């Protein structure tokens, strides 16, 4: 069959942890991006280092991509478990590439185009099963037109640190995979179209982009305790921060990490930590301390399935309650949430700017799907970002660290500033910072600290409304985090079917831009709020802080929504 080039192709690779599935996905992604395609990936893997089901889904296209797509056009199965898990998704027209020497006999559904490749056997003949994944990669490249020159380049650069013999073995296996595919008759319709011109983009994971954003913002001190799925942020920062004169500490636990961050910030440095739900739970006392002592800090929380240890490697959006209210007493903070990798850069800069300006903790929520998702983003120019630094005391007159100012913001003095000596304590304090427990003082100080937050909504870009005109929508969808990208595509397709639908995509979740929610709600007959948690956490806050009553659509199976799920839900509601 003649295969027309596709401008939007989804390839999924599945196999056992340790079989090199993730490497295949990464290599395809890098090669497609080099060839000028937009890429958006999703990967999920077991908590075990070896064994269990690992999956990588890669979507490449010539248009802007907002999510990893519904299902796949091409599936590559390394073993029987991966085949069984994905069997139900093998629809007519799908291409299936599988290891015909991995001890499983696929029962191929009608209409599926099957390409048996003896991956294990060919790898053994070349010296070892380690290169089985390169046999698969070569076959995929030949069958679906994945740019072969770019693939050879990225294979060489991926394995160069393992030695030239490893590079050569992998390149040879890649060629062998291509040869094996040539012997098969291509019957499916999937061939990747590659654009004539390249764009100035870079491929980054969500975690790396947060690290990059922090460096652009002027990060000087980073402390963290490793935790999936946030550890890559520390790895990225460890590689780059010391070269810029900054300091990174791997703390003994999360309580130590946030304490060190507050100490560094008190000393005048821009400071940050990165963690996941269990770590954020441990940090809650010190977040109260940061608010009380008005110490700027950025805490990145990459959400994973909970509660407790939960699903360590899986996706969820279930830390919003904790992010907004996780601390004792009346404790405030700012909470932002990122939609995609591009946001991971820009909103990390914003998080630092807000922390510095309002002298309070800022929690930046990412999630398990974004953490490992690689996407093409416009090459960031650090000069394009406005950078805000804290208001410092100039050293004139009597210094009162917690002076009761109109906007609640009081200038900070770095330690060592002549006349600026002060203590920053978790105890309630007077304007000079000395302990004071009178009712009048506590009320005045609480009002001061919360007064600062009143200006935040106006300091952040208005919430994006996704609509084609001002006409009232039958359904308005409110989405946050990486669910936004799924809703964007669902709305495009629903509009093409004639539905009157709008989207609302808040990135500042606390303080909630309530007036903007109200204005959006006024233009919609019904509101739907899809989120990947059990309780409908954002819907809870929307109901509490506005007059709106969005209908919750929640899932919590460790995977993100797909556009199809949102489309079906809207069709169901409007039926
Ligand atoms: N030749 C040489 N080396 C190869 C190779 C090849 N053909 N193919 C893969 N490798 C190497 C990779 O470079 C990688 O090595 P590195 O760690 O030195 O970079 C390693 O083999 C693993 O391969 P990769 O493709 O990245 O992963 P995989 O698909 O085999 O899956 C994981 C393994 C990632 C799922 C698993 O090891 C893992 O880490 N699980 C998560 C554990 C976790 O986070 N638990 C959380 C506890 S809270």
Image (cartoon, rainbow, N blue to C red):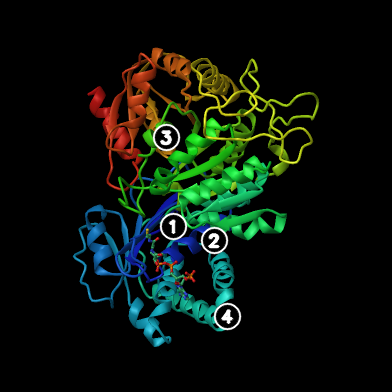
Q: Nearer the viewer, mark 1 or mark 4?
A: 4
The CA distance from mark 1 to mark 4 is 33 Å
Q: Left or right? Give the position of 573 relative to 181.
A: left
The percent position of residue 461, horizontal first and vertical second, equals: 58, 25
Q: Nearer the viewer, mark 1 or mark 2?
A: 2
Q: Earlier in the sequence, mark 4 or mark 2?
A: 2
Q: Earlier in the sequence, mark 1 or mark 2?
A: 2
User: Above or below — where is 285 with respect to 331?
Assistant: below
Q: What residue is pinned by disc 3?
A: 327
The CA distance from mark 4 to mark 3 is 50 Å
Give SS at disc 4.
loop
Which residue is located at x 34 percent, y 41 percent? 561
User: Above or below — where is 426 with respect to 209?
Assistant: above
Q: What residue is pinned by disc 4?
A: 163
Whether ligand 1 has any atom under 8 Å from the Cβ at mark 2 is answered as: no
The disc at residue 462 is: none
The CA distance from mark 2 to mark 3 is 45 Å
Q: What residue is pinned by disc 1?
A: 191
Instruction: Estimate how packed mark 4 is, as few (under 14), some (14 to 19) or many (20 or more) residues with alpha carbons within 10 Å.
Output: few
Q: What residue is pinned by disc 2?
A: 31
The CA distance from mark 1 to mark 3 is 53 Å
Q: Are marks 1 and 4 in contact (CB under 8 Å)?
A: no
């Amino acid at each position: 069959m003649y295969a027309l080039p596709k401008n939007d192709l989804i390839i999924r690779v599945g196999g056992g942890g340790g079989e090199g599935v993730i490497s295949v996905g990464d290599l395809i992604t890098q090669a497609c991006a080099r060839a000028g395609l937009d890429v958006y990936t999703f990967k999920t893997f077991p908590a075990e280092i070896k064994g269990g089901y690992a999956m990588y889904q890669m979507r490449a296209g010539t248009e802007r991509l907002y999510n990893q797509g519904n299902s796949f056009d091409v599936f590559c199965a390394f073993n029987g478990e991966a085949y069984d898990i994905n069997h139900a998704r093998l629809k007519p027209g799908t291409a299936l590439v599988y290891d015909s020497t991995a001890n499983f006999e696929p029962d191929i559904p009608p209409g599926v185009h099957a390409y048996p490749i003896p991956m294990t056997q060919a790898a053994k003949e070349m010296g070892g099963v380690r290169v089985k994944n390169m046999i698969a990669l070569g076959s995929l490249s030949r069958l679906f037109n994945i740019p072969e020159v770019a693939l050879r380049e990225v294979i060489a650069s991926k394995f160069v640190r393992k030695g030239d013999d490893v590079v050569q073995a992998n390149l040879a296996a890649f060629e062998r995979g291509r040869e094996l595919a040539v012997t098969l008759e291509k019957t499916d319709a999937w061939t990747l179209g590659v654009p004539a011109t390249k764009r100035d983009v870079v491929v980054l994971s969500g975690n790396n982009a947060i690290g990059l954003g922090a460096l652009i913002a002027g990060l000087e001190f980073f402390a963290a305790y490793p935790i999936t799925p946030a550890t890559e942020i520390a790895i990225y920062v460890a590689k780059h921060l010391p070269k810029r004169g900054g300091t990174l500490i791997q703390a003994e636990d999360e309580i130590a990490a946030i304490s060190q961050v507050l100490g560094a910030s008190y000393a005048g440095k821009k400071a940050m930590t990165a963690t996941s739900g269990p770590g954020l739970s441990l940090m809650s006392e010190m977040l109260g301390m940061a608010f009380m002592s008005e110490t700027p800090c950025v805490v990145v929380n990459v959400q994973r399935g909970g509660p407790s240890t939960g699903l360590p490697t899986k996706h969820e959006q279930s830390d919003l309650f904790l992010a907004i209210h996780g601390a004792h007493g009346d404790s405030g903070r700012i909470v932002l949430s990122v939609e995609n990798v591009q946001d991971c850069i820009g909103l990390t800069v914003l998080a630092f700017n807000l922390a510095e300006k309002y002298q309070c903790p800022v929690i930046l929520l990412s999630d398990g799907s974004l953490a490992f998702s690689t996407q093409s983003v416009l090459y960031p120019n650090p000069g394009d970002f406005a950078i805000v630094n804290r208001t410092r005391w100039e050293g004139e007159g009597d210094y009162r660290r917690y002076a009761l100012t109109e906007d609640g913001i009081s200038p900070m003095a770095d330690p060592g500033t002549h006349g600026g000596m002060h203590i920053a304590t978790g105890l309630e304090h007077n304007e000079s910072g000395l302990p004071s427990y009178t009712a009048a003082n506590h009320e005045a100080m609480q009002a001061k600290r919360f007064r600062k937050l009143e200006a935040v909504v106006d300091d952040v870009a208005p919430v994006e409304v996704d609509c084609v005109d001002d006409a009232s929508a039958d359904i308005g969808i409110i989405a946050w985090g990486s669910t936004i990208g799924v809703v964007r595509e669902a709305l495009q397709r629903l509009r093409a079917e004639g539905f009157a639908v709008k989207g609302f995509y808040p990135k500042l979740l606390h303080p909630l831009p309530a007036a903007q929610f109200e204005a959006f709600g006024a233009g919609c007959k019904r509101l739907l709020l899809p989120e990947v948690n059990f309780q409908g956490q954002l819907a809870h806050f929307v109901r509490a802080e506005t007059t709106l009553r969005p209908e919750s659509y929640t899932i919590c199976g460790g995977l993100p929504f797909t556009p199809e799920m949102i489309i079906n839900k809207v069709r169901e509601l409007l039926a």
